Amino acid sequence: MSVPLPPRWIRRLLLQPIFWLSSVCLLVVGLPFLLVVMALLSFAVPAKLRALRLLGFAIVYLTLEVVALVLALGSWLASGFGWGLRRPAFVEFHYRVVTDLLRVLHGLGSKFFVLSVERRGPDLPGDDGDPETIEHPLLVLSRHAGPGDSFLLVHELLTWEGRRPRVVLKETLQWDPMIDVLLNRLPMTFLDPTPGQQDAVVEEIGRLAASMSSRDALLIFPEGGNVTAARRTRAIERLRRSHRETAAVRAEGIVNLLPPRPRGVRAALIANQDLEVVVVAHTGLDELNTVRDIWRAIPVDKTMRLRWHAVRASEVPTDPAGLSDWLFTEWEQMDAWVSAHRPGAPEAIG
């Protein structure tokens, strides 16, 4: 049973100051120890030293938490005690902070956990950096697999010619003070992902899509969560209960993914008819679903393979039946690609 998230004013006035002070104290003690250890530790140490890798990454993360909260406090004061935080200059500042933080986490995390990213895909629409080019906001549709894929995908979006990501996130992520403060100041939203809240999720996706500019990219996960055997079974049963037998049969043929839900995609396409759609497939971290999986895998020594292709919004149907068929076709192709490229599979072309 999850612990309810406290109200924002409690997080701001009580929990986050306590966390910040605790982090500073831990860094004062832990950083000198890490420096001594790192004198003896290279990034190629054997897996039996996984605890030291976690310690190093934890100290890096805590350091970034402390720096991020200091910058957030400074921007809050500079904006007139929060009055002007929604102004473009402050939004751009927070995007730069998030970009720099993710760049550090990605760079050091890749070293600590021996993780690399292999990218494959065409140039993205409106991605040439030419201010004279007519650019379009992007709707990015991705599978959901493993706890690190959202972080890696947002990092990738920020490297696509300065795209500014918008993401619908689980509200429990706000337990992390850095995520809570920074992302609540950007056009992102935190929602309860339980089935009873799906109408609110769809509404928020439409709201975020409607106000997107040419630089923005809205990232959504049509599956609604990480794939597990139980979730896959429930999703297929849900399709049958709603008398969508054809979709249920197609879902049974998809082995690596959950069947996609079209409502959020449709809400975005209707809310903003200037969108270009990018479908992202990835694999490599599929088996890292629990803390135990991650612990055993350190150093991960894995390659996340990332492939995408762009589709003009005019080519994507917006009627419910047509969109569902289109989305299932994309997911069937993605499922075949994941089967061919996941760890242990023979290397495929394409």
Image: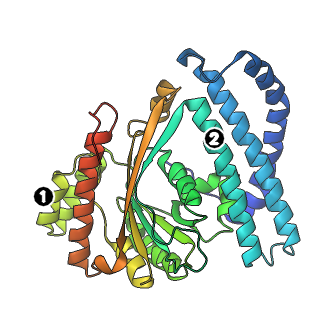
Asked whether disc 2 touches disc 1, contact meaning CB atoms under 8 Å apart, the reply is no
* Disc nearest the viewer among 2 and 1: 2
Real-space Cα separation, disc 2 to disc 1, in angstroms: 42 Å
Residue type at numbered disc 2 = Gly
**Where is residue 314, by image quadrant?**
bottom left
Earlier residue among tags 2 and 1? 2
- On residue 249, the disc is 1
* Closer-to-camera residue (126/59): 126
Residue type at numbered disc 1 = Val
In the shown orientation, is residue 242 left or right of residue 10?
Answer: left
User: Is 184 placed above or below 282 here?
Assistant: below
Q: Position of residue 230 (x, y in %)?
A: 28, 46
**Where is residue 239, by image quadrant?**
bottom left
Q: Position of residue 182 (x, y in %)?
A: 69, 61
Q: Which residue is mark 2?
A: 107
Q: Residues within 10 Å of mark 1 (few under 14, many from 20)?
A: few
Q: Residues within 10 Å of mark 2 (few under 14, many from 20)?
A: few
Which colour scheme appears in the figure? rainbow
* Closer-to-camera residue (102/163): 163
In the shown orientation, is residue 135 left or right of residue 247?
Answer: right
Identify the residue at horizontal 20%, vertical 69% (top origin).
325
Task: Identify the element where label 2 is drawn.
Answer: helix
Instruction: Confirm whether residue 190 shows in the render.
Output: no
* Closer-to-camera residue (305/69): 305
Q: Position of residue 347 (x, y in %)?
A: 29, 36
Identify the residue at horizontal 69%, vertical 18% (top origin).
41
